[in-house]
C-alpha cells in the first residue's frame, strides 16, 4: 500500500497544498514555511483524532480571515486484492492505471469543521439495492432472504428488535452490508462514515510514526515518544504472529470466567453480592454492576520497556546524545522491516508504516548525515515502509539517483515556497513536486545535459531549495566579486541578501545552460552573470544561455569582455580570483559608498533591485 498524494486545505499556514508522495518523500523549503505542519497533519489524519485546536485553522490578520474548516485527503494505491472484502472498503476501491500498471486505489477524506467533530468520507461507487432485498423492511426480512446471522450481529450491535421496521438510523447501517448492494464502478460520490466506526478503516490503513525534531529528548524517549512507540510496533507484530499469543488468549478467556461477577460460585461473584448487600443496607435499591472483559488480548497484554543505551557505559537514553537516540529509533525501524518482510513472505498481512522524520540530519555531522541518507533510501525503496522527511540539509538530497521505475516515482521532492495568493494578496505556502514533472524527466533523459547537471549537484547548489532568489555566476571571480559587494552593503540590506539570495557557481559557461534549465523546472528564475569572451569556443555558449532564460535579457548580465574590464583592471594571466580580491580591497574601502560606480549601478538596478526598493 502506497501514498499517491496527501492534500491539505486550511491547516495552519497552509491555505491549500497537494503533497505528492513516493517511497521516499522529501519536504524541502526555507524555515517556517509549513514542513512540520504537513507531518502533523498526516499524524492527525492516520489517527482517530476527532477535533482540532482553534489555532490549527488557517488565518490571516490583514485582511482578517480565518478558515472555517480543515480538509485532509489521501489517495492510497496498490491495495491488495483482498481489500475488497475489508469492512467499509467494498465498492470504494477503484482500479486505475495512470501509468499503464493497474492498481487498486482508495480516496479517503476527513473534514474538521471549526468547533465540531471530524467528518469521515470515502470516495465510493454509486450503488443501488439488489432486487431481492428491495422490499425488506425488518432485519428478519433480510435474514429470510439470505443475509447471515453473523453479518447482522456485526452491523447491528446490542439488542435490536428484528421484527420491527428499521428506523432511519438503522438503515444507515445497511451501507455496511456489501452483500445487498449492486455497485456501479463508473459513477462515484463521497460516502460518509465508511465502515461504521472509524477503527474499522484505521486498522487497514498505514500506521504513522513521527520522529520529531524537538530539542527535548523526552519527546523521543518518553512514553508515547518515537523510541517507545517503535518498540511497541515491534512488540505488536511479534505478538500477532506468535503461537504463544494465541494460547495467552485462551487462558485470558478462562481467567475472565473466574472473574465473572454474575457467577455466584466464583469468588468475584460472591464479593459483588456482599458489596451490594452493604450498599442496599444504606441506600435501598442501589447496586453496583461490574463486568469483566479480558477477551481482547491486545489491550490486556501490554509491555513496559526499560530502555538503556551504551557507548562506554549503559545509561538511560536521556544521558545519551540526541543524534544517537534518533539513529537508534531508525535502526529499530530497519530491523522491523526485515521482520515484516519475513512475515509477508509467509502470507501474513501487516499494515504498512509511514515514517514521518523531521530533519533526519539534525544532530548528525555531515558524514553521518550522508550515511543516514543512504539508510533512508535503502529502507524506503526496499520495503513496505514509506518515509516522509523534512529537511534543511543539502546532504539529504540526492538528485543523481535514477531509482524511479516506469510507473511509480520512488523519490519525490516537494519544494515548498511562498507565492502571493490571488484572493487575499498575501504570501501562502505552495508545494511543487518538481522531480516528477515532464521537464525534469526530459532533462534526465538527455544524458549529456544530465551528466553536466550531476557534476554540479553538490551541497552548494542544493542550497537553492532554501532561498528565494538565485544568482548563477560563471566562475570564481564573479563569485568573489558578489561576496565582497555583499560585505559592503548597509547592514539591513546585507542581512536581507544573506537570508533570501543564494550564489551558485557554475564553473564554466557550458554548465550554466543545464543549470538554468534545472532551476526553471523548480520555478526559480535565476539571474545569470557571465563573460562575453572573445574566443569562438567560449562565445558559442552565449546565445544558448540566453535561450535557456527564455530570451529574457533582463535576467542576464553578459560582461564585455571580461569581469575584470567591468571592475577596472587588466585581465591577469593567472590567479584571477586573488587579483580581483586585491584590487577590490585596495580601491573600494570597507563601505557601500566606496564601491566602484559602474559595478555598483549594475548591482542596484539589475542584480538585486529588490534590496533597494
Image (spheres, helix red, strand yellow):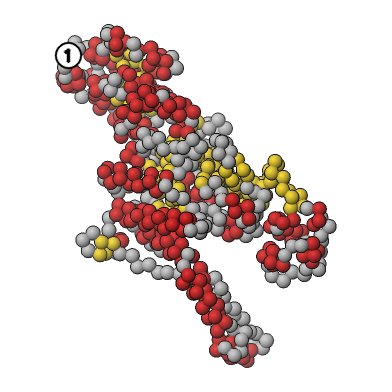
| Residue 280 picture quarter | bottom right
Q: Residue at x 52, y 73 (%)?
A: 249
Nearer to us in this view, 140 or 603: 140
Residue 234 shows in this picture: yes
The part of the image, by quadrant, that contains residue 373 is top left
- Asked if residue 410 lies left or right of residue 374, the reply is right
Where the C terminus falls, by quadrant? top left
Q: How many marks?
A: 1
Mark 1 is surrounded, within 10 Å at the Cα level, by few (under 14), some (14 to 19) or many (20 or more) other residues, namely few
For the point 41% across and 58% down, the residue is 339
Residue 427 in the image: state x and y as whole percent. 48, 34
* Vertical placement of residue 557 versus 61, above or below: above
Residue 495 shows in the view: no
Taking 490 as reference, is 378 left or right?
A: right
Q: Quadrant of residue 460?
A: top left
Q: Position of residue 315 (x, y in %)?
A: 26, 64
Q: Is residue 350 left or right of residue 600?
A: right
Q: Nearer the viewer, residue 613 or 414?
A: 414
Q: Nearer the viewer, residue 198 or 318?
A: 198
Tell me: 595 left or right of 1.
left
Residue 343: horizontal and vertical position, in percent? 46, 58
Residue 152 to residue 92: above or below: below
Q: Residue at x 39, y 48 (%)?
A: 379
State the residue position of label 1. 572
Q: Secondary structure at mark 1?
A: loop
Amino acid at each position: 500500500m502506497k501514498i499517491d498524494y496527501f492534500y491539505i486545505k486550511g491547516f495552519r499556514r497552509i491555505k491549500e497544498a497537494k503533497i505528492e508522495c513516493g517511497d521516499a518523500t522529501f519536504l524541502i523549503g526555507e524555515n517556517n514555511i509549513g514542513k512540520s505542519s504537513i507531518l502533523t497533519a498526516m499524524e492527525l489524519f492516520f489517527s482517530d483524532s476527532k477535533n482540532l485546536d482553534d489555532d490549527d485553522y488557517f488565518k490571516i490578520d490583514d485582511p482578517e480571515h480565518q478558515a472555517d474548516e480543515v480538509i485532509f485527503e489521501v489517495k492510497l494505491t496498490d491495495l491488495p486484492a483482498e481489500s475488497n472484502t475489508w469492512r467499509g472498503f467494498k465498492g470504494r476501491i477503484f482500479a486505475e492505471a495512470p501509468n499503464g500498471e493497474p492498481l487498486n486505489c482508495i480516496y479517503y477524506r476527513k473534514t474538521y469543521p471549526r468547533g465540531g467533530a471530524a467528518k469521515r468520507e470515502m470516495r465510493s461507487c454509486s450503488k443501488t439495492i439488489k432486487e431481492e432485498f428491495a422490499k425488506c423492511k425488518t432485519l428478519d426480512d433480510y435474514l429470510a432472504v439470505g443475509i447471515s446471522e453473523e453479518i447482522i450481529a456485526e452491523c447491528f450491535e446490542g439488542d435490536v428488535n428484528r421484527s420491527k421496521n428499521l428506523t432511519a438510523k438503522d438503515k444507515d447501517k445497511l451501507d455496511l452490508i456489501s452483500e445487498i448492494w449492486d455497485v456501479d464502478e463508473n459513477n462515484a460520490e463521497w460516502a460518509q462514515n465508511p465502515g461504521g466506526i472509524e477503527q474499522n478503516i484505521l486498522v487497514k490503513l498505514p500506521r504513522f510514526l513521527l520522529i520529531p525534531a524537538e530539542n527535548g529528548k523526552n519527546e523521543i524517549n518518553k512514553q508515547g515518544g518515537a523510541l517507545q512507540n517503535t518498540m511497541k510496533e515491534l512488540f505488536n507484530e511479534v505478538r500477532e504472529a506468535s503461537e504463544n499469543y494465541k494460547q495467552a488468549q485462551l487462558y485470558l478467556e478462562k481467567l475472565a470466567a473466574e472473574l465473572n461477577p454474575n457467577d455466584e460460585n466464583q469468588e468475584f461473584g460472591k464479593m459483588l453480592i456482599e458489596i451490594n448487600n452493604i450498599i442496599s443496607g444504606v441506600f435501598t435499591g442501589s447496586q453496583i454492576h461490574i463486568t469483566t472483559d479480558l477477551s481482547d488480548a491486545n489491550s490486556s497484554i501490554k509491555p513496559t520497556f526499560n530502555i538503556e543505551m551504551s557507548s562506554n557505559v549503559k545509561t538511560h537514553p536521556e544521558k545519551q546524545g540526541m543524534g544517537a537516540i534518533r539513529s537508534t529509533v531508525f535502526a529499530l525501524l530497519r530491523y522491523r522491516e526485515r521482520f515484516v518482510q519475513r512475515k509477508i513472505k509467509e502470507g501474513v498481512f501487516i499494515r504498512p508504516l509511514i515514517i514521518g522524520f523531521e530533519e533526519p540530519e539534525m544532530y548528525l555531522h555531515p558524514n553521518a548525515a550522508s550515511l543516514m541518507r543512504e539508510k533512508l533510501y535503502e529502507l524506503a525503496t526496499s520495503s513496505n515502509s514509506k518515509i516522509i522527511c523534512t529537511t534543511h540539509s543539502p546532504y539529504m538530497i540526492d538528485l543523481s539517483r535514477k531509482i524511479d521505475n516506469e510507473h511509480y516515482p520512488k523519490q519525490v521532492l516537494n519544494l515548498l515556497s511562498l507565492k502571493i495568493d490571488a484572493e487575499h494578496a498575501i504570501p501562502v505556502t505552495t508545494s511543487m513536486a518538481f522531480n516528477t514533472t515532464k521537464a525534469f524527466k526530459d532533462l534526465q533523459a538527455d544524458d549529456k545535459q544530465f551528466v553536466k547537471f550531476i557534476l554540479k549537484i553538490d551541497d552548494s547548489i542544493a542550497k537553492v531549495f532554501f532561498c528565494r532568489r538565485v544568482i548563477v555566476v560563471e566562475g570564481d571571480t564573479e563569485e568573489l566579486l558578489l561576496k565582497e559587494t555583499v560585505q559592503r552593503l548597509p547592514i539591513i540590506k546585507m542581512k536581507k541578501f544573506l537570508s533570501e539570495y543564494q550564489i551558485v557557481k557554475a564553473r564554466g559557461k557550458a554548465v550554466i545552460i543545464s543549470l538554468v534549465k534545472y532551476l526553471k523546472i523548480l520555478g526559480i528564475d535565476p539571474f545569470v552573470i557571465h563573460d562575453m569572451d572573445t574566443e569562438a569556443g567560449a562565445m558559442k555558449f552565449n546565445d544558448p544561455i540566453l535561450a535557456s532564460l527564455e530570451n529574457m535579457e533582463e535576467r542576464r548580465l553578459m560582461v564585455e569582455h571580461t569581469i575584470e574590464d567591468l571592475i577596472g583592471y587588466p585581465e591577469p594571466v593567472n590567479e584571477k580570483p586573488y587579483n580581483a580580491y586585491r584590487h577590490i580591497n585596495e580601491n573600494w574601502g570597507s563601505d557601500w559608498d566606496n564601491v566602484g560606480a559602474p559595478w555598483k549601478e549594475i548591482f542596484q538596478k539589475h542584480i538585486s533591485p529588490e534590496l533597494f526598493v
